Image (tube, rainbow, N blue to C red):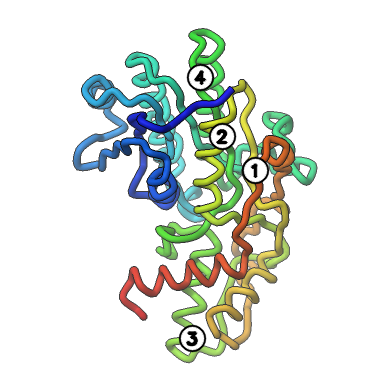
Amino acid sequence: MSYDLNGKRVFVAGHRGMVGSAICRRLESEGCTILTAGRDVLDLLDQAAVRAWFAAEKPDAVFLAAAKVGGILANDSWPADFLYDNLMIEANVIEAAFRTGVGKLLFLGSSCIYPKFAPQPIVEQALLTGPLEPTNEWYAIAKIAGIKLCQAYRRQHGCDYISAMPTNLYGPGDNFDLQSSHVLPALIRKAHEAKVEGAGSITIWGTGTPRREFLHVDDLADACVFLMKTYSDDGHVNVGFGDDISIAELTGLVAEVIGFSGAIEHDLTKPDGTPRKLMDSGKLAGLGWTPRIGLREGIAGAYDWFLSSTGRR
């Protein structure tokens, strides 16, 4: 089947975030009307407000990219917020989409839905086969609930709701706050500040041995539009780059791109998190989509965006 976005009213929930803004950029070439609503206009935690907005705006399709997100520290510090907020956002949007006859919806999850010790690379079928990583289980549980909610509406009501599970993301619009950011933007900021200050070293959490996969957000946006147009099935779809890198190697690459030549030290009092998280994106590749932005190129672009957006150029 195919779903034509041309001429459609398409709501991007979370358009101010890194993922949502990338989807908006990608949709500009699809001939659709892009609908957005910031928090000052629509509180996605407010069920009545969400239902009223959908009834008034009547979107044809929805990209559900809105979420409360953060790294290990944020997840560990605010577990109730991560669980409650994400459950409410997805439940309110999906139910409102059903009530107003939205033709198609894509829900965005995260690779953290998978068990901590899932066989690598992780296939979609690994979901719910083992315990989660404790440092982000609250967020993971909420995202698993979102997948199941889409499946439930598809099975009970015949709704064309699908789910995509991206790996670790980075790029323009990322969060560089060291208290709540993910590892790659945190490393970019640390390396930049150390370079500017002439520091002799930067410190990373843990041993540096965990391996992570990174996908540029513009590649994710392209994959999401591809899935919206071509995919309709019960199962969620992994969206990854297909290769991973250790945190120590990543730190060295970031330092090289930014021009920081100091030492890399390890704070062994901090957790490593999941030992390895590489997703099997063979299902998506079989549908005909592959990423195009390499890690070095992507880091350089993300650093450029960091400099321009913070006025540090």
Query: Which quadrant would the N terminus be assigned to in this image?
Result: top right
| Residue that appears at 62% across and 72% down | 251
The label number, if any, that marks residue 289 in the structure image: 1
Where is residue 154? Give x, y as percent: 53, 15
Tell whether label 4 touches label 2 (CB within 8 Å). Answer: no
Query: Counting residues from the N terminus, which is met first, the one under dot 3 or under dot 4?
Result: 4
Say which residue label 2 marks.
227
- Tell me the kind of residue under disc 1: Trp
Q: Give the side of residue 94 with respect to residue 2, left or right.
A: left
Quick one: SS at disc 4? loop
Among numbered discs 3 and 1, the one appearing first in the sequence? 3
Residue 249 place in picture, x, y as percent: 69, 71
What's under tag 3, amino acid-wise?
A: Lys
Q: How far apart are marks 1 and 2 (CA)?
A: 9 Å
Q: Helix or strand or loop: what does disc 1 sit on? A: loop
Q: Earlier along the polypeptide chain: callout 2 or callout 3?
A: 3
User: Which residue does the numbered mark 3 point to in the structure image?
Assistant: 195
In this rendering, the label closer to the viewer, 2 or 3: 2
Q: Nearer the viewer, mark 4 or mark 1?
A: 1
- Of labels 2 and 4, earlier in sequence is 4
Name the residue that disc number 4 marks.
160
Q: In this view, does 86 lie above or below 294?
A: above
Say left or right for 31 vs 250. Answer: left
Residue 274: give x, y in percent of width and height: 68, 51
